[in-house]
Image (cartoon, rainbow, N blue to C red):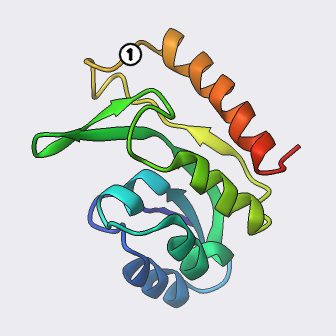
Amino acid sequence: MIIESHGEVTDSPTLKAILSASGPGTALLWDAHHTVVASKEAPADTYRALGEWVRHTHLKDSRPEGDTVRYVLTGTGTVPVREIVKVLAAGGYKGYYSFEWEKKWHPEIDDPEIAIPHYAKVMREYLADAGVK
């Protein structure tokens, strides 16, 4: 079973309580955007608390816009995606660095034909900087 840090469940103490009580085989899909933006957690703090359960990631960037956020191209917002990659790499994470681009639910964001190649380009740099091959 895998649980995603999303919605009402984005802070490390709540996630840790759920994961600890769920027994072996339970894992975390770390949607780092939500732990950073919604729960105001530093990536290193989140990984320190939950790293043993992280099996997959969702990465995206945003910047504040009124009472909400606007999703933006990776590296152009306020979410520390480069830092998240460094934290994961330093922790020995071997899973995917999955790009989440929700155009269906956010039609105002850039088209996937722009966002996906941009993510690939930026992530090659971030991964190289973090020593991931």
Left or right: where 22 falls relative to 71:
right
Q: Secondary structure at mark 1?
A: loop
Residue with the most extreme right position: 133
Tell me, yes or no, if residue 26 can be seen here. Answer: no
Q: Position of residue 131 (x, y in %)?
A: 84, 50
- Residue at x-position 67% and y-position 34%: 123
Q: The N terminus lies in which quarter of the figure?
A: bottom right
Is 124 in front, or is 103?
A: 124
Left or right: where 93 falls relative to 100:
right
Q: Position of residue 14 (x, y in %)?
A: 37, 81
Left or right: where 87 falls relative to 113:
right
Q: Is residue 119 above or below residue 90?
A: above
Task: Indicate the quadrant where residue 51 lies.
Answer: bottom right
Task: Indicate the quadrant where residue 94 lies.
Answer: bottom right
Q: How many marks?
A: 1
Q: Is residue 23 above or below residue 34?
A: below
- Residue at x-position 66% and y-position 63%: 87
Tell me, yes or no, if residue 29 can be seen here. Answer: yes
The residue carrying pointer 1 sits among few (fewer than 14), some (14 to 19) or many (20 or more) residues within 10 Å by Cα, namely: some
- Residue at x-position 69% and y-position 41%: 126
Task: Indicate the quadrant where residue 65 lies.
Answer: top left
- Name the residue beneath numbered marker 1: 110
